[in-house]
Every structure is written in structure tokens, then in C-alpha cells.
Amino acid sequence: MIKRILVALSGTSCTQSAIKHAVELAKEHHAELSGVTVFDTDRLKDVGAIPMGGASAAHELAEHRMELASENIENSISQFEQACTNAGITNRVLKETGDSAARLLSAWRYHDITVIGLRGLFEYGVLHDHGHLVLDVIGAGLRPLLAVADEYKPIQSAMVAYDGSPLAARAMKAFCMVGIWKPMPTTVVCFEGQDGEATELLEDAASYLEAHTFSTTKKRVEEKAPNAILETMETCNADLLVMGAAKRTRLGRKLLGDTAKFALENSTRPIFLHH
């Protein structure tokens, strides 16, 4: 049951798409929307190495960054509130300050799903972190999560990347059981290197999806997932990729898997992540 949705108002190229997807889900589930902004002073003031005699210019650049970020935060809030008003969605804005990843994780604790952009977090047109904060918050355990691309497109079909691992199974089960989307045409895919015999895994996964009234197609790909996952998604014409997103080292620390990291950095379609 989805009743609270958190959407990161990141000021990136994905922000409009994130708002649209979040509004669509809120309408479907009669849910509340929380838009979160984070004004991270330390990141904004970090202009890199300062050459001798450049302190004044560096200070001016930092001040300019903060002014521009403030303006873009207000623009993002305005876009969010207008979209919610137009759709009749109950909403609120969380205006946070401090460490971007920490503040997003704090807000996430009281929401059922989080919608973010694939291309960066809380950059507001002034930072160029190339999405590393996205990877940080996912690696820290922020899930379930819908990471969306620049261009909005309704989600009407899905591809489940399945290798028989508990991680992949949990993602597939969350996709079915949380009920975020109505049952849709879904392709379940096994790539080279899965845990077990591919035919049996595909049959069992498809049976599970069908028990939840998803219509399924089974596909085996004779390449490893990092090399083929996005191309396979295109071939299947899937609007959404469903996958697990973490692994554990022998020390017990969660890390983002190579396949998930590659998909997040390169996908042009939304990704649903769970752990």
C-alpha cells in the first residue's frame, strides 16, 4: 500500500520527469506527495583548489552558486506545487539544509517510495557531480526507489532482471507485492552467470509473476548483465527495469553492484530498485 511518496526536487534535467511520475503514482494510489529540496552549503561553497591570490574570486563564485541554487530551489518548488494543484494532490514541501545524502535519507524513512532522477541530486544547475550522490544514497539503502530519466514516459511494461539470487527475488517480489503499478506485460530475463539453470529460473520467476496477474514473457540472454542489460531492455521495449541494487562484502558493508551502477549511469528509462 502506497500512501506517502517522496520526490527529490533536484534541479537537474530529470526533475520535471520525477514530478510527473510522482504525481501519476499519487493519483493512482490516492497518496500524499512530499517534495524535498536540500540546500547543501558545503557542496555549494566547495569550488576546488584556490590558486594564490584567488580567494576573493573563489568567494564570489561560492556566493553566486548559493544565490543561483536558492533561485532554482524556489523554481523547483513552484513547479512541484503547481503540478500537485493541477492534479488535486495533497502535498507538502520539505526544505532541508545540510548534507544532501543524509537529509534525503532522513526524509525517506517516513515515505513508502522515493522518486529521484537518474542524473544527479540537488545540483540546481550549479554543481556537476555526474550522479555520484544518486549512487551514494542507493548504496546507503534508500529503497524502494524509482529512478527516472530526463524524458517522461508512462510506465506500461517492465523487464525484470533475474539471476536467482535473494537480491533479485526480493526486487521482483516488491515489484509485485507493494502494488505500485497495476499488473502489466513483463519480460523476465536471465543473463549469463545466473545462480542456477536458466530455464528453471525463468519458469519459476514467470510463474510467480503470473500468480500476481502479470502477463509474462521469458528471455535468456547469452551475455553477462552489465554488457547487455540496457540493450535487452530496448529489445523488449520495456518502460521500466526492475532489479536488485546492492551486494555485501565479507565485511558486511553494502555496495552497489556493478550491473546496477552501470544501469543507473547509462539508462534512458526508469529503474525500480529494491534490496
Image (cartoon, helix red, strand yellow):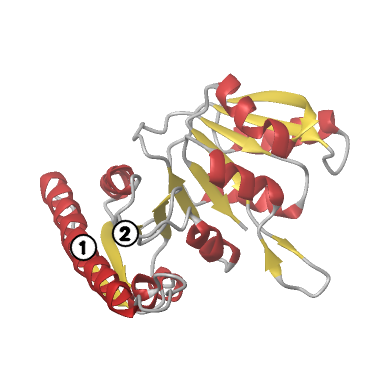
Crowdedness near tag 1: few (<14), some (14–19) or many (≥20) residues, C-alpha within 10 Å: some
Q: Quadrant of residue 61?
A: bottom left
Q: List x then y, in percent, for residue 24.
A: 29, 42
Q: Which mark is residue 68?
A: 1
Whether 20 is drawn above or below 35: the answer is above
Please determine whether, in this image, residue 68 is positioned above or below residue 58. above
For residue 126, the mark is 2
Name the residue type under label 1.
Leu
Q: Is residue 89 above or below residue 201?
A: below
**Quick check: 198 left or right of 234?**
right
Figure quadrant of residue 195: top right
**What's the CA distance linking mark 2 and mark 1?**
7 Å
Amino acid type, residue under disc 2 in the picture? Val
Left or right of 100, for residue 272 = right
Nearest to the observer: residue 91 or residue 127: 127
Q: Residue at x 20, y 53 (%)?
A: 80
Residue 127 placed where, x, y %?
37, 60
**Residue 213 visible within the image:** yes
User: Where residue 206 appears, x then y in whole percent?
Assistant: 68, 32
Viewer-proximal residue among 91 and 209: 91
Query: Is mark 2 in CB contact (under 8 Å) with mark 1?
Result: yes
